[in-house]
Image (cartoon, coloured by chain):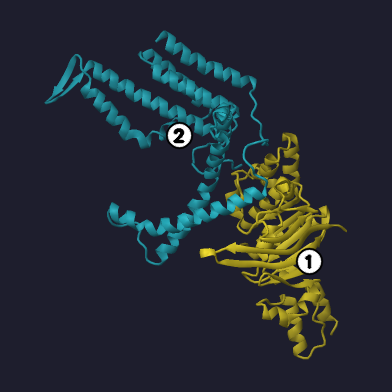
Chain colours: A cyan, B yellow
Amino acid sequence: MLKDITLGQYFPGNTPAHRLDPRTKLLAVVFYIVAVFSCHSAWAYILTALVLALSARVSKVGARALFRGLKPVLFIIAFTALLNLFYTPGEELARLWLLRVTREGVWTAAAMMTRITLLITGTFLLTYTTSPIQLTDGLEALLGPLKRLRVPVHELAMMMSIALRFIPTLIEETDKIMSAQKARGADFESGGLARRARALIPLLVPLFVSAFRRADELATAMECRCYHGGEGRTKLHVLRFAARDYLALLFYLALAAGIIVFD
Amino acid sequence: MSTMLQTEDLRYAYPGEEGAETVALDGVTLSIERGSFVVVLGHNGSGKSTLAKTFNAVLLPSGGKVYVDGMDTGDEALLLEIRRRVGMVFQNPDNQIVANVVEEDVAFAPENLGVPTEEIRRRVDDALAAVGMADFTLYAPHLLSGGQKQRIAIAGVLAMRPECIVLDEATAMLDPAGRREVLDAVERLHAEQGITVVLITHHMNEAERADRVLVMNDGRLAMDGAPREVFSRAEELAAMGLAVPDTVALLRRLRAGGMDVPTDAVTVDECVDAILREF
C-alpha cells in the first residue's frame, strides 16, 4: 500500500527495522552519530561501518540505494578530502609545486571521507525505513518534555506533517501552472541562470497566492473538525516500545559507549 | 420532530475596505427539522455559503441568533460540542484533508476530541465503511479521485458522530461520476443513520433528492418548500438567475408544445411516468 509519500525516500516494507518504534530509530541514529564522531582509529571506523552494513542488511536496503544518498554531497566530500590531503602538516610523502601530501594528510582525508559517508548513509537508512508520519510522531513524542519549556512541540509536528501532506498537492499545482504558462508561450528551459530565474516569477506568484488560499481553507476545515491545539488530543496510533526496541537501543548505545571508552 | 438548526433574524456582514460592509445575510429566519434532507439553492453571492458557515460557528452572526440543537452558537463554551454535532464538508477536497494517510485523516476529528484509541479505530472503520471507502484505509489521499477524496472528507466528519452534515458546494469541483458517488453516499447516510443533511449547491438537479428546498437570494430566504412546489415557480426562479432542473424544464417545454403533462415532476422517474401517461 501507499504509505509512501512525497520525498521518495521511504521504502515501504515489513522488515524488523520497519517495525521498530520510530523513537527507537531516532535515538539509535543519535547514538550512531555520536559513535561516528568518536571514532579515531581504523578499527573503530571498521566496527561502525560493520554496524551500518548489518543495519542495512536487516532493513533490506541494497548498497546502491544506500549510496545513492551520497550523490548530492559528493562535491563536499571530495572538497573536504582534498583540503585535508594537502593542508595537514606532517611527514611528507610527495610534493607537487606548492602542494605537499603528507602521511597524516592521507589518513585524515580517508578518515573524513569515511566519516561523512557513514553519517549520511546512516541517517538515510532512517528515512528509508520510517514513513514521514512515523518520523513526525516519533519526534513529537521524543521532544515532548520540551513542552514544559514552552517549546511548541505539537504545533511544530503538526506543521511538519501538514507540509508533507501538501508537497504532492503543490507539485501537481506547479505542473498545472507551468503547462498553462507554456501554452501561452512561457519559456522555462532556455537562457542563462538569471533569465531562467526570472521566468519562474510568473510561476511562483500564482503558486503562492493559491498556497495562502489553501492554508486559509485548511485552517477552517481543521477548526470544523474540532481542532484546538495539542491539548487533550488522543492518537489513532499510539507508540509503544516492544522488547526489540530495547534490544536495538542497547545495541547502538553499546556501540557508542564502546567507541568512546576504548578509542 | 425536534429542531436541529434554527436561525432568528440572522444577519451577517463581511467587513469591507474603509468601514464599508458587504451584507451577505439580511434577516434570515428558518428552522431545519432533525432528520430532514434540505437543499439550499442560490446563485453566486446569494448568501448560501455564508448561511452554511453560521451553522457551526465558523462565522458568528453580526445580528440575530443561530441555535444548534437549542445551543446558541455565540456561546464559546459550547463551541466544540456545536462543531461536533454539525459536521461541515467544503468545496475543495484537497484543502480539507489534513493527513497523508486516509485512516489518519479520518481519525483527525476524534483525536481532537480526545476519544480513546480503541474507540477511534472503531469510528474510523465505521466511517470509511459508511462512505464505501473501507478498501482505501492506507492509501495516500492525493492518489484518489475527486469523488473519493470528498467521500474521505465526509468520513472525516462522520467520525465525530455528528447529528447533522452540512455540505457547502461539496460537489462543485467534481465530475458527474464523482458527484454521483458523493450524493449517493450522503443519501445513504441520511436514510440509514438518520443524519440531518443540509446540501448547499447550485446544481438544480441535486435538489430532487431533498424533502425541502430553500432558495436564497440577496441574503434573504426567497422560497421555502417541497421541491415540486419550488420548481413550479419557474418564472420567479428565473428572475433570481436560477434555472429549474432538467426534468421540469423538459416537461414545461412539452406542455408549451401542446402536451398535457404536469410540470411538477422533479425526479427522473416521476418525469418518465408523467410523459408515459400521455401515450
Q: Chain of mark 1?
A: B
Residue in the picture at 41% in, 26% down: A119
Element carrying mark 1: loop
Residue bearing mark 2: A65
- Seen from the viewer's position, the closer of residues B43 and B210 is B43
In the rendered image, which quarter is residue B57 located in?
bottom right
Q: Amino acid at mark 2?
A: Ala
What is the spatial separation of the Cα atoms under label 1 and label 2, in whole angstroms? Answer: 56 Å
Q: Which residue is mark 1?
A: B210
Quadrant for residue B175, please give it: bottom right
- For this orientation, the residue located farthest to the top is A262
Side (left or right) of A15 relative to B161? left
Q: Nearer the viewer, residue A77 or B115?
A: B115
In the drawing, what numbered circle is on residue B11?
none
Whether residue B271 appears in this view of the structure is yes
Helix, strand, or loop for circle 2? helix
Residue A145: image location, x then y, percent: 57, 26
Q: Residue furthest right?
A: B1
Residue positioned 32% across, 55% down in the render: A196
Frontmost residue, B99 versus A66: B99
Q: Residue at x 58, y 54 (%)?
A: A217
Q: Is residue B172 left or right of residue B190?
A: left
